[in-house]
Amino acid sequence: MDKDYNTERDNLIIKEYGRNVQKMVAYALSIDDEAKRTRLAYIIISVMQQINPNPSPNEEYYKKLWNHLNIIADYKFNIEFPYEVLDQESRSHKPEKVPYKDNNIRFRFYGRNMEMSLNEIAKMDPGQSRDALLIEAANQLKVMYVTWNKDIINDDLIAAHILKMTNGRLLLPENVELRSANDILKQVKTEQDELDSLAKKKKFTKKPAFTKPRSKKPAPRR
């Protein structure tokens, strides 16, 4: 008795429909009469619909079924399809790669928006308004740096980063002291502790699952 091993069978083209559908398609391809081949194609589609049902079938669903049938038939099902199906060349054509915009971010922990903001400040006329915005931005940069790196830094590093991001157009005013790195680290730790505490409270304040109370058995009569 010859045994039918999976390893000796043809590969399943679309596994979700199974081997029987693939055999039916192969048999349909062997039929010369186009009318009979077309009728069998509709029967195969109805079988595929039962195997892979859709609770609310629409045009896209049926179009997908006919395209799957065409794929299983290796694009050799020479019939009048009720829907437009893709040919092999269209399906194998790979879409062109979408070019990604190169933002050229110098410091990722600051982000692109902060770099753009600094360059907008650099376009302003020198004066108190520009200095005030620059100092505010510098403090924000220091918070972002310390939060990201969890490290103590001095103001000279922030000033150097601003100079680099603006191509030498912005320089922090002399004798300006930015926010203390120690204060920033304390704030970050406090905020993290609050989040952890809130998470623990949510974990332990879950409502217990409802259990139906047991009915008391009546006391036996004496």
Image: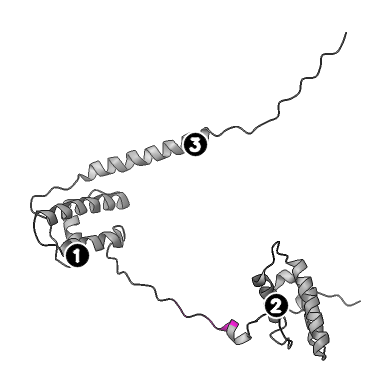
Residue 60 % position (x, y):
64, 71
Q: Earlier in the sequence, mark 3 or mark 2?
A: 2
Q: In the shown orientation, is residue 144 left or right of residue 41? A: left
Q: Position of residue 20 (x, y in %)?
A: 80, 74
Residue at position x 29%, y 66% in the image: 105
Kindly state the secondary structure of the residue where label 3 is placed. helix
Magenta residues? 91-98
Q: Disc 1 designates what residue? A: 164
Disc number placed over residue 66 in the picture, else none: 2
Spatial CA distance of label 1 from label 2 is: 59 Å
Q: Quadrant of the N terminus?
A: bottom right
The C terminus, quarter of image: top right
For discs 1 and 2, the disc positioned in front in the rendered view: 2
Relative image position of residue 205 (x, y in whole percent): 52, 32
In the rendered structure, which amino acid carries the disc numbered 1?
A: Lys
Chief secondary structure of the magenta portion: loop
The label shown at residue 62 is: none
The amino acid on which the numbered mark 2 sits, given as a three-letter code, is: Trp
| Amino acid at dot 3 | Lys
